[in-house]
Amino acid sequence: MRAIWAALAMSLTVAGGAAAQVMDDPEANLVEALVVSAKLPGPAWWRISDADTTVYILGTPGSTPKGMAWDSSVVDRRLKGAFTLLTPPTFSAGVTDIPALLLLRRKLKGDEAWAAADPALAGRVQRAWTAVEPKDPDGWRDWKPLALGPLIASKTNRKAGLEYGQVSRRIEKLARKHRVKVQVVERYKAMPLLKTVARKTDDAAGLACLTETLDTVEQGQDRYRVAAQAWAEGQVRAALAAPRSTDRCQYLLPGVAEMGQRLKAAEVEALADLLKTPGHAVAIYPIRGLVAQDGVLDELRARGITVKTPGD
């Protein structure tokens, strides 16, 4: 689901709807039988199989310290001879989308009426923004709450030396070394969802998201580092303890829940299709989405597909 947040961020970096303030979090609950720590060195793996195919699935972390070391020996071994590396769905926008992205960016600009109505929240934003933008301490005043959430989260993580996606990039590099085809589950155009979010998200949703982001920022970024280290050591439950404000915020946005279901369905279908090819394959997917109730592995089990845990 981070792909959806990345799509929203895209509209910020180019030169009515969800009024409920209680976040509906489809990944809040976990399948306990799947939350098992690894026996092998390094991060945890799950696998699905039939008579002549095995698909090894690595759960990937969220934000991790830049340059974080982790044991990739199992990844390297399993990529050798694999017929594909399956990677999660992605969003994209092209050159022709730039005018629309700029228009959306303008829609995320706002006056300071919300700040006047909630001075306590505005004070928290001021402190968080100044910490990451000391040369432009009032820059936050140019943005609506909906934009401030991802902006503050991104800037805070960057200052703390945290990155998203570096584990996946390393695995794709290893796949190229082994001449393994990288197969993206599905590619989606970002603009339809971005337009829905910018046009239909109301102020209440933006404020709720901003509040949750500030709650996370004010508690510090060490929890990301601890969870990342746990992931590297195959300690699944501890890895799942990373803050989730970014993920949870997405579900306040119109169209996101439906897109989330679409992304999950595409992933499940793609994994099931891999079982039609004899041999072995490797797949990567965000770790919480794998082990959540009604998540990817839960859906595969419901189809009657054999799922093994990192403890098997």
Image: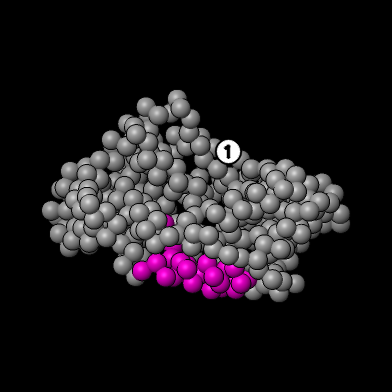
Q: Residues within 10 Å of mark 1 (few under 14, many from 20)?
A: few
What colour scheme does the image use? one colour
Tell me which residue sits at (57%, 68%) in the image.
231
The foreground one among 307 and 71 is 71
From the viewer's perspective, is 185 left or right of 21?
A: right
Inspect the magenta stretch and tell me whether residue 226 lies in it. yes
Q: Residue 125: horizontal and vertical position, in percent?
A: 23, 58
Q: Main secondary structure of the magenta part?
A: helix
Which image quarter is the C terminus in?
bottom right
Residue closest to the far left: 116
Task: Look at the numbered disc 1 and give the secondary structure of its residue.
Answer: strand
Tell me which residue sits at (76%, 59%) in the image.
77
Tell me which residue sits at (82%, 46%) in the image.
277
Q: How many marks?
A: 1
From the viewer's perspective, is 201 left or right of 29?
A: left
Observer able to see residue 33: no
Quadrant in the rendering for residue 181: top right
Q: Which residues are magenta?
A: 220-246
Tell me which residue sits at (48%, 62%) in the image.
65
Q: Amino acid at mark 1?
A: Arg
The residue identified by callout 1 is: 187
Q: Residue 5: horizontal and vertical position, in percent?
A: 44, 48
The foreground one among 137 and 235 is 137
Observer able to see residue 310: yes
Inspect the magenta stretch and tell me whether residue 176 lies in it. no
From the viewer's perspective, is 62 left or right of 114?
A: right
Q: Residue 30: horizontal and vertical position, in percent?
A: 56, 68
Q: Residue 226: horizontal and vertical position, in percent?
A: 49, 72
Quadrant in the rendering for residue 235: bottom right
Residue closest to the far top: 96
